[in-house]
Amino acid sequence: MYQANSDRYQSMEYRRCGRSGLKLPAVSLGLWHNFGHIDSLENARNILRLAFDKGITHFDLANNYGPPPGAAEENFGKIFKDDFKPYRDELIISSKAGWGMWDGPYGDWGSKKYLVASLDQSLKRMGLEYVDIFYHHRPDPETPLEETMATLDLMVRQGKALYVGISSYMPAEAAKAIEILKSLGTPCLIHQPKYSMFDRWVEDGLLDVLGETGVGCIPFSPLAQGILTNKYLNGIPQGSRASSHRGNGAIEEDQVSADKINKVRQLNELAKERGQQLAHMALAWILKDPRITSVLIGVSRPEQVTDSLECLKNYNFTSEELSRINQILG
């Protein structure tokens, strides 16, 4: 029977999420990859146990995580039942809906019909009465934003979610969604955008919107799906995500260009000067901004959890270091 480490809260830093009463660990665990039916359930169990033992209280899922879609929630549900049920009130469990999940016109995007059915399915797969955070996973160009946000408000009023958030919304869309939710009496807790040294779109207005409105931010793919690690310093290794063709949004070989590898090597030199590994510096670079609540990591092995937490030892950068990073990234 799993017994959590009694010192689990001693080493983790917890940050307030926007202007809410909720705190999240500075590093959270995403179950986007490596928790599907093609993966080892025991490896997934060991990853989740170690994460919680290290003070990571937030596990982030979505209806379509797998492969196949739904598999990550099913596997998480099995592990939760065996290991984490006694710790439910110490955990933040999130899920999302907004991408294709089942056939027909009601299994995708942002309608009330889809979102209500999707959350019910997610709760059933995970064996939960509620999720702590439920996100709309991406904007829907055809459904009125008012309908989608009213549905998120409904989830909270029904007790199926404690908080709600949005993901991958551009600045103007995010501002409007946040305003609608505020008017309904269910504040937007958090936004989950893609953000890394190689993908900095959130700096063009989104972080300002979140800072001004008191909404938290939890970036995904902070390591550009492994490019910002030592893994690709000498090209694409066998067995890496880029060579595996997993699908489900995993990185493809053509995304690892010679130009990117060159930049990664220069960034790696700076990381060495800072006494860090490249991955630790890349995570720290995101956490340096006070508007960031937490950063989502994805791991394939338990030891990668411990390794990722090294980023918390130094996320302060000198102006010279930041200038050099900007220069490298062009």
Image: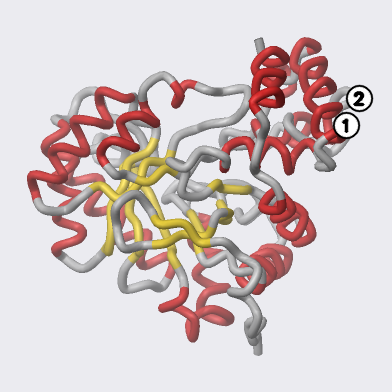
What residue is shown with label 1? 237
Q: Which residue occupies 16% across, 32% down? A: 145
Q: Secondary structure at mark 2?
A: loop
Q: Residue 250 appears at what percent x and percent y? A: 63, 34
Q: Is residue 79 left or right of residue 226?
A: left
225 in relation to 311, above or below = above
28 in relation to 92, above or below = above
Figure colour scheme = secondary structure
Q: Which label was assigned to residue 234?
A: 2
Instruction: Check contact, mark 1 vs mark 2: CB within 8 A.
Output: yes
Q: Say few, some or many: other residues with alpha carbon within 10 Å of mark 2 (under 14 / 14 to 19 / 20 or more).
A: few
Q: Which residue occupies 25% across, 47% down? A: 188
Q: Which label was assigned to residue 218?
A: none
**Farthest residue, direction bottom:** 1
Q: Quadrant of the N terminus?
A: bottom right
Q: Residue 105 appears at what percent x and percent y? A: 25, 35
Mark 2 is on which residue type?
Asn
Q: Which residue occupies 29% across, 44% down? A: 214
Q: Nearer the viewer, mark 1 or mark 2?
A: 2
Q: Which residue occupies 69% across, 64% down? A: 47
